[in-house]
Amino acid sequence: MLNQHPSVFEELKKVDALVDARNEPEMVTERLPFTVRVVRSEEDILKAVAVRHSAYARHVPDYGETLRDPEASDRRPGAVVLLAASKIDGSPLGTMRIQTNAFEPLTLEQSIDLPPHMKNASLAAATRLGVVGAKIGTLAKMVLFKSYFLYCEAAGIEWMVVAARSPLDRQYERLMFTDVDPSLGYIQLHHGSTIPHRIMCFEPATARARWRAANHPMYDFMVQTLHPDIDLGVPMAPRASIPASTPPTRHPERPGVGSLQTLS
């Protein structure tokens, strides 16, 4: 009988594992015409602010005028600013700020009451996303989102959170983000422009499996492609810890968030 030969089951498991491995495409390496890195100098933050202002001025001119200078949130503990910069001349091509709740609640919590399963979870919000208007800006936006995902994965973030206006919210829907509270729809943010936004979330820990199961068109780019030009200062392995440049004081109600780099 089979139950008298447990080694048979072990061999079958090995075969299944080999089949799964063969079905998984090999990783490929892709070089980019720009780098993405964490801002660490005044020169870099001014580049990030320049492309941020330019991007917002194209879409919401009045609000864009308020973004000519660095914001206090750019330097707060638990926040990092990412900069995509050309390899040719160093010119800024895109930026994003990531705010975690490692030290204080997310700014968008001024506008929404989070559901119970998120209130004590580790969160990271993507804010101030802006890219140049040229074709390369589209690629920079994709790579900045991948950087956001990798950063959250490395930091052990439980929920990625965004506030997106129409039609940008559709892009996040396609990436499998869902509404934090489907009953709310679009809401006005207390801390930003008057344009209504949807508050959406995404679970990075299950992202790879869900994208693969859905045969998602971004799976190869997000998971199967190595981008050495993304340099977040840490090995891009799941659940890696991120070295801190600020003391590891955390918001008392938000346990579980790893120490995160901040602008020095």
Image (tube, grey):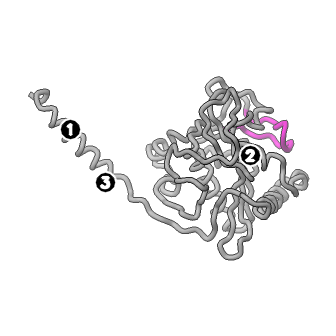
Q: Quadrant of the N terminus?
A: top left
Vertical placement of residue 194 versus 45, above or below: above
Which residue is at 84% across, 50% downward? 71
Which residue is at 74% across, 56% downward? 130
In x, y percent, where is residue 31? 54, 68
The residue pinned by badge 2 equals 166
Q: Does 25 lie within the magenta span?
A: no
Q: Residues within 10 Å of mark 2 (few under 14, many from 20)?
A: few
**Mark 3 belongs to which amino acid?**
Arg
In x, y percent, where is residue 37? 65, 59
Q: Does 187 lie within the magenta span?
A: yes
In x, y percent, where is residue 245? 68, 48
Range of magenta residues: 185-200
Q: Residues within 10 Å of mark 1 (few under 14, many from 20)?
A: few
In x, y percent, where is residue 61? 88, 56
Vertical placement of residue 67 versus 90, above or below: above
How far, Cα to Cα, is label 3 from label 1? Answer: 19 Å
The residue pinned by badge 1 equals 10
Which comes sooner in the sequence, label 3 or label 2? 3
**Mark 3 or mark 1, whichever is nearer to me:** 1
**Mark 2 belongs to which amino acid?**
Ser
Q: Magenta part mainly helix, strand or loop?
A: loop
The residue pinned by badge 3 equals 22
Q: Residue furthest bottom?
A: 88
| Viewer-side residue, 148 vs 239 | 239
Q: Secondary structure at mark 1?
A: helix
Q: Residue furthest left?
A: 1
Circles 3 and 1, Cβ within 8 Å, touching? The answer is no
